[in-house]
Amino acid sequence: MDKNVSIYWIRQDLRLHDNPALKAAVNNGAIVPIYILDDINSGEHKLGSASRIWLHHSLEKLNKQFKNKLHFFNADPLKIISEICETEKINKVFWNRVYEPWSIQRDKKIKETLNLKGIETNSFNGSLLWEPWEVLKNDGTPYRVFTPYYRRGCLNAVGPRIPTKAPQKIQYYEFQKIKSLDIESLNLLPTHNWKNKIIKKWNVGEKAAEQRLEEFISFELNGYKEGRNFPNKKNVSRLSPHLHWGEISPNTIWHKISNLQHLEINNFEDTDTFLSEMGWREFSYYLLFYFPDLPRKNLQKKFDNFSWDNNSLFLKAWKSGLTGYPIIDAGMRELWSTGYMHNRLRMIVGSFLVKNLLLHWHEGEKWFWDCLVDADLASNSAGWQWIAGCGADAAPYFRIFNPITQGLRFDPNGDYTRRYIPEISMLPNKFLFNPWDAPNEVLKESNIKLGETYPKPIVDIKISRAKALSTFAKLKIS
């Protein structure tokens, strides 16, 4: 075997541009690009349904970019890579690092095993602006509060690397003995037609990610600081699934936006706010790296004694968007129909689940994990811990979003809510977020029968808030 043949192992880096591992592998010589679906090592965090839908279509696009030379497997990566290297006499493997705790353990084992066999492994940072170990406090310990982490730590560290271009020419090595699968054989797509409803809302792949960034910069970045809070406005990037799957690198986005700041093309506050949102993504990965139990254990241990309720009917109503609180139900229905939810709504529905229904944040984390196309273990876990008040730099426990005032404030014309809850669309704005207060004649004119065409509230907002505050107050403040 020619020593200049290597495996390029694709994980969450479904792109050609600004791809350090791909660049190094191509510079080394011919490559065998492989993707391995790993439902073995991932355990309880194997990919959710919406993630699998996105992944299927993104891999299709990437395979075309690789001239249909991408090989697919569904097994333990250690077994597959070892077998390829042994059978095809390949002695180099390249990959970009991933940061889920189970992935780190798996990759460490793979690296140690391959190295003992004389197979060279090369890993790179292709998905973060700063490696977690590059940003520490002066005493060498990790930050636990976002602002000093980002402003004092990240922005004073070595800046994110300049993005690189896609390889001009890729030389492929053809397997002599190994048999791989095709994309369909990975069985990523669920059998129900939910997959069709979700994917038609999105353009998937590297080219789509680059287009989305350009559209955001041209039409939606201006006014981002304030507009991002209003779900009916377009001042959101919707880049999160592209970022999660590595269809575009954070470095590409960072430098595009940073250059606008320097050129004073856009409002500085808008660009600074957007970059800080990218900082939150980094912070989530940072927390997951230093606190690998983040997806399941409270960072603030006093919350271990919290007495959660276990009401399956409440949970079902929340998942289905049938709580009787229109802004909550609109957010949950957006999630189910698009695989996405506006960030303001993620906070509102999360607060309602945890602090009004007193259901464990784990329930929300698991539902988001299955339903979001941008389901990301770091961001999902850190976000839910923040909402619940038990995480790093968390929202205080007494901060409980009122779904009525949140609706009035952030969807003042009701356009977002009416889009996802058409059965109450005829209600006047005055009663849109509290239909139970509408006089009978208004309900009748709006073709609404509370409890039939639209549910009555499953909890009283004032009583549930008081109960939550009482329960939170019982926690021992350490």
Image (cartoon, rainbow, N blue to C red):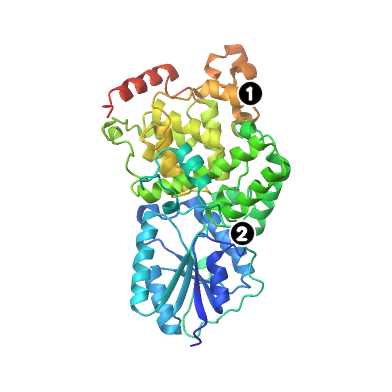
Which amino acid type is marked by label 2? Pro
Disc number for residue 265: none
x and y percent of residue 38 in the render?
Answer: 42, 63
Foreground mark, 1 or 2?
Answer: 2
Give coordinates of residue 141: x percent, y percent.
35, 46
| Res 42 visible | no
Q: Where in the figure is residue 382, as x and y percent of width and height?
A: 42, 42
The answer to which quarter of the image holds residue 40 is bottom left
Residue 383 % position (x, y): 45, 39
Q: Residues within 10 Å of mark 1 (few under 14, many from 20)?
A: some
Read off the residue under disc 1.
Answer: 412
Q: Quadrant of residue 342?
A: top right
Assess disc 2: are there few (<14), some (14-19) or many (≥20) residues with their C-alpha within 10 Å of its C-alpha. some
Residue 163: numbered disc: 2
Would you say the residues marked 1 and 2 are in contact, meaning their CB atoms lie under 8 Å apart? no
Residue that appears at 55% across and 19% down:
435
Q: Is residue 243 left or right of residue 413?
A: left
**Relative to 373, does residue 148 appear above or below in the rendering?**
above
Q: Is residue 330 above or below residue 381?
A: above
Mark 1 or mark 2: whose residue is earlier in sequence: 2
Helix, strand or loop for disc 2: loop
Q: Is residue 391 above or below residue 372?
A: above
Toward the viewer: 174 or 271? 271
Residue 218 is at least partly visible in this image: yes
Q: Tag 1: residue type?
A: Pro
Work out how far the residue at label 1 is from the one at label 2, CA to CA, in angstroms. 41 Å
When the figure is inspected, residue 56 is found, relative to residue 346, above or below; the finding is below
- Residue at position x 46%, y 66% from top? 123
- The count of marks equals 2
User: Which is more toward the observer, 90 or 418?
Assistant: 90
Quarter in which the C terminus is drawn: top left
Which residue does the image show at 73% across and 44% down from the upper left?
218
